[in-house]
Image: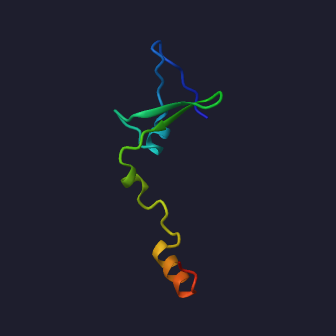
Amino acid sequence: MPIVSTSSKGQIVIPAQLRRKYNIGRGTKLNVLDGDGEIILRPVLQDVVRQARGLFRGGVSSLQELTRERREGGGL
């Protein structure tokens, strides 16, 4: 776990490895949360729809599931 220091203004440097991993660049906005004794930094989602694309890839298609249920008589 990397250790960082605060500047006189309370600023920190996020290690490069974590900036790359979470796509944090110049101007990236972060939410700062108080997490029961922890300070949590979370990047603000810029485009929620674009970032959520593919989130459920590989799962069961809702259309396929509905079609299967109706074929089996379990529809409305």
Tag count: 0
| Residue 49 percent location from the top left of the image | 38, 54
In the orientation shown, which residue stands out farthest toward the front? 76
| Residue 6 percent location from the top left of the image | 51, 19
Q: Is residue 68 above or below residue 34?
A: below
Which residue does the image show at 47% across and 12% down from the upper left?
Answer: 8
Q: Quadrant of the N terminus?
A: top right
Residue 52 occupies which quadrant of the picture? Answer: bottom left
Which residue does the image show at 54% across and 21% down from the upper left?
Answer: 5
- In depth, the one of 13 and 63 nearer the eye is 63
In the orientation shown, which residue stands out farthest toward the top? 8
Q: Is residue 37 above or below residue 52?
A: above
Which residue does the image show at 50% across and 77% down from the upper left?
Answer: 66
In the orientation shown, which residue stands out farthest toward the right? 37
- In depth, the one of 55 and 22 nearer the eye is 55
Q: Is residue 52 above or below residue 61?
A: above
Q: Is 61 positioned to the left or the right of 26 in the image?
A: right
Residue 27 occupies which quadrant of the picture? Answer: top left
- In depth, the one of 76 and 30 nearer the eye is 76
Which residue does the image show at 47% across and 59% down from the upper left?
Answer: 55
- In depth, the one of 19 and 58 nearer the eye is 58
| Residue 29 percent location from the top left of the image | 39, 34
